[in-house]
């Protein structure tokens, strides 16, 4: 039984019913519908913390999905799982792949910045100050790009950019 049919909570069931209705109405190929079903099951598994199952579903969706924007969200979610597991290099790879397909994805830019900031903090704690500054500069670059795409988001990043002197822009929109 597909995961989407096992959801216990009302919101997940409602989403599944609505998604199924939309898929029936929209003129999409069988392959696209199957890809979406895998993606939906991947999101459900990810929300439940079942990362291995989510990755399997996302990989199956990637094999079938042809639309670049849809593929970018699948890749982004794979990156989220790797980041959650502390696999920063893998997460960065998937976020960058997502951005190649969809450069207007501020959440991927933000998550890349978060990883670089984390790596900078780690380097700073280990007294590798030059390396830390390089990571912080990279984080700043990605946060600036994310904020330009979504100026009302990432307020903490905006404050960090200002307080560290990495941005002299007060308003991004």
Image (cartoon, grey):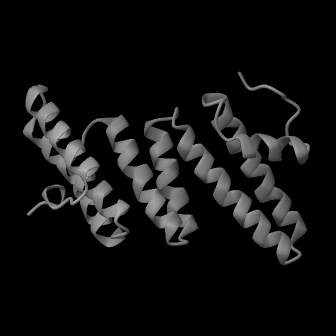
Image position, residue 33 (x, y; %): 14, 41
Examine the rendered structure and indicate whether residue 86 appears above or below residue 73.
Answer: below
Image position, residue 2 (x, y; %): 12, 60
Horizontal placement of 53 versus 116: left or right?
left
Residue beneath the point at 89% across and 75% down: 127
| Quadrant location, the C terminus | top right
Between 113 and 14, the one lying in front of the other is 14
| Quadrant location, the N terminus | bottom left
- Total marks shown come to 0
Image position, residue 12 (x, y; %): 26, 50
Between 3 and 67, the one lying in front of the other is 3
Image position, residue 5 (x, y; %): 13, 57
Residue beneath the point at 84% across and 29% down: 169
Where residue 122 sits, quadrant-wise, is bottom right
Horizontal placement of 5 versus 49: left or right?
left
Residue beneath the point at 82% across and 64% down: 132
Where residue 109 sits, quadrant-wise, is top right
Horizontal placement of 31 versus 162: left or right?
left
């Amino acid at each position: 039984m597909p995961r989407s049919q096992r959801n216990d909570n009302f919101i997940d069931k409602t989403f599944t019913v609505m998604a199924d209705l939309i898929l029936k109405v929209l003129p999409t190929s069988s392959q696209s519908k199957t890809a979406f079903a895998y993606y939906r099951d991947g999101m459900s598994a990810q929300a439940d913390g079942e990362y291995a199952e989510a990755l399997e579903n996302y990989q199956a969706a990637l094999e079938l999905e042809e639309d670049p924007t849809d593929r970018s969200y699948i890749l982004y979610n794979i990156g989220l799982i790797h980041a959650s597991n502390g696999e920063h290099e893998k997460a960065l790879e998937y976020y960058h792949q997502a951005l190649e397909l969809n450069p207007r994805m501020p959440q991927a830019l933000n998550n890349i910045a978060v990883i670089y900031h984390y790596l900078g903090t780690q380097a700073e704690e280990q007294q590798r100050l030059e390396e830390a500054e390089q990571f912080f500069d990279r984080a700043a670059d990605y946060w600036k790009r994310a904020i330009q795409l979504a100026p009302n988001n990432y307020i903490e990043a905006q404050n960090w950019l200002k307080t560290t002197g990495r941005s002299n822009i007060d308003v991004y929109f």
